[in-house]
Amino acid sequence: MPRRQTYTLHFNSKHSLNAAGKHVRDGLSSVLRTGDNLWLSCDERTSIERLRLTGPREFSQHTSYELTELLDLPSDKSEEIDIEGLAESEHYLWIVGSHSLARKKPDPDGPDAAKEIARLAQVKSEANRYLLARVPLLRNPVTGDYELHREAPHPTDPAQTLRAAQLRGSADSNDLRDLLAADAHLKPFLSIPGKDNGFDIEGLACAPDGRLFVGLRGPVLRGWALVLELLPREDKHGRLRLSELPGATETYYKKHFLALGGMGVRELRQRGTDLLLLAGPTMDLDGTIAVYCWSDALRCTEDSLVGPNKLERLFDVPHGFGPTAGQDKAEGMALLDDEHVLIVFDSPTDARKPAAHQVLADGVKVSSQKG
């Protein structure tokens, strides 16, 4: 891994714990930078966290935005969204949930082995996970902070109003999953939990023209990861609908298969016409985590098979193993600038938690953007 610089993220104790007592720093799943603000999601809540750059390598002044107040979630805030991707474009913050099913977790030390084994057969669907939404994101000219709104005037076009909107959904699906239910590659995996190589979204990037790139942690098909390309548009009822996408074999979405050495996508970030990808294991295990550059990804005019010669492996990211097995799992990656990324970790080790309500992230230099 190239030389890293440590960044300290300071959280506010009033916003840091969920109902189950889990700290936001222990479940970070995505990170995005807009100006001096850092936006973070934790996979076990329904809020978005905002920090502000307050030192050379410090973010603090924690503010929490409750999405149940900005969007019409199909379930209440007691049910997590499992937010796995954040992106920004044209005065909107885009948010995507995992869209995955979840298998119950057994306790190997439980007093009733049969009961714990039975838990492994239980698969649950949670409505809030099927979220693809946008929320107005505007810079406050007084404070310099970016803020989220349910509705707000467009900052430069008084004829436009920015409104929060989301893809049509129900208690057990949404328009995207309904489309994929007939897909030759993905149909078999929609009924499989995410941690079992089932369908599982874990990355989001937005092109300037409104196209979304959705990275899948799973499934990985014979070593090939998958990125979906979508074009959501607002309909007359104020809901998001998937529009026809020129060049798409499946009309409403493109499929891009990437040779990531058997890894799935954990995060996506747009850099010019390129996409930077954070890749890691699709299953629940410790394994290689690496950052790749997919050059000219935004210029793909049709479905694509992106071989290893078209992907540049920039660096590997350390992960937990041995005594720290299951910890320091890189899940989020933000662009600090065109030459540096910031990586945040799920289940950070104690070494990454220097004080109460703090966690350390890694800033890493990547190759400069190609002209």
Image (cartoon, rainbow, N blue to C red):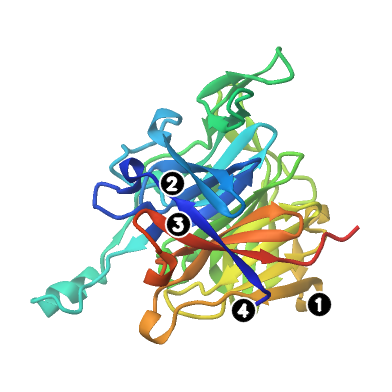
Q: Amino acid at mark 1?
A: Asn
Q: Which residue is mark 3?
A: 28
Q: Is residue 280 above or below residue 16?
A: below
Q: Amino acid at mark 2?
A: Ser
Query: Is label 2 in contact with label 1 (beta carbons under 8 Å)?
Result: no
Mark 1 vs mark 4, CA separation in Å:
15 Å
Within the image, what quadrant is residue 297 found in?
A: bottom right
Which residue is at the far top? 159
Which marked residue is nearer to the observer: mark 3 or mark 2? Answer: 3
Which marked residue is nearer to the observer: mark 1 or mark 4? Answer: 1
Which of these two is toward me, 355 or 346?
A: 355
Q: Looking at the image, is mark 3 or mark 2 earlier in the sequence? A: 3
Q: Is residue 342 left or right of residue 368?
A: left
Which of these two is toward me, 97 or 269?
A: 269
Mark seen at residue 309: 1
At 69% from the left and 67% from the top, the residue drawn is 257
Query: Is label 2 in contact with label 4 (beta carbons under 8 Å)?
Result: no
Task: Classify 10 Å Cα crowding around label 3: few (below 14), some (14-19), many (20 and above).
Answer: many
Q: Secondary structure at mark 1?
A: helix
Q: Secondary structure at mark 4?
A: loop
Q: Secondary structure at mark 3?
A: strand
Q: Amino acid at mark 3?
A: Leu
Q: Is residue 244 above or below residue 268?
A: above
At 54% from the left and 52% from the top, the residue drawn is 58
Q: Which residue is mark 4?
A: 223
Which marked residue is nearer to the observer: mark 3 or mark 4? Answer: 3
